[in-house]
Image (tube, rainbow, N blue to C red):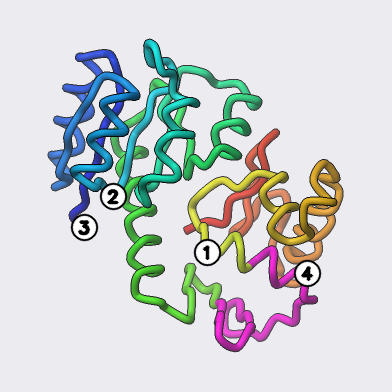
Amino acid sequence: MAGRVLVVDDELEMQRALRTGLQYHDLDVRAVGSGEEAVREAASWRPDVILLDLGLPGMDGFATLRALRPTTRAAVIVVSVMPGEKDKVRALDAGADDYVVKPFGTDELVARIKAVLRRQADVSAGEPVIHLGDLEIDLARRSVKAAGRVVKLSPTEYELLRYLALHAGKPVTHTTLLRQVWGEYAVGDKYNTRYVVAQIRKKLGDDPANPRYIVNEPGVGYRLEA
């Protein structure tokens, strides 16, 4: 699966390591060292994925992310040494598609990049049915099957699962789910998402202690396994 990846990191050693590792997996890679360069390169080269370090000099990663979102459709994977939940939530709510903490394995990073590329291909193809393992979500019919079994969901349960499915493989914050499913008035009431996710898991036959479909992102939200 080919794809263009723009690395945004001010450390030359990290640039070289990522370029070498990603090119080995047949990805087309370019690297820049600042947020300003990232915005220009994203506009001219049109990458599919941007790997963005938060600790950039001058225009930091958060400011760069805010500048990128209105101007590019590329998926943004934040790559940072900042492991805190607040930083993850802040980045994801600002429009990041995923968050990887340094140090990380190349195989993990490549897997996340390829998940993003598959998701982009599905959206571009306008695929009305999303298949995630034995989970099937028919967007046109608003129907769900798990291991061939029809799963009856309430409208709210379906909308939450649908949103996670459209962003499969990506961590989605409580705030984003609340805004997308319930509207702005509900933002801040995490109980809504927890309760509905519990109901969906029950209907899918998913073990909350060892979930196959919807996994917890502690302090952040949820991720539907791709």
Residue at which label 1 appears: 166
| Residue drawn at (49%, 26%) of the image | 62
Q: Position of residue 176 (x, y in %)?
A: 67, 48
**Of callouts 2 and 1, the N-terminal one:** 2
Is residue 203 rendered to the left or right of residue 12?
Answer: right
Residue at which label 3 appears: 1
Q: What element carries label 4?
A: helix
| Spatial CA span between label 3 and label 4 | 35 Å
Residue at which label 4 appears: 156
* Kind of residue at disc 1: Leu
Q: Which of marks 2 and 1 is in front?
A: 2
| Residue drawn at (49%, 40%) of the image | 96
Q: Which of 219 and 33 is in front in this view?
A: 33
Rendered-image quadrant of the N terminus? bottom left
Q: Is mark 1 on a helix, strand or loop?
A: helix
In magenta segment, residue 4 = no
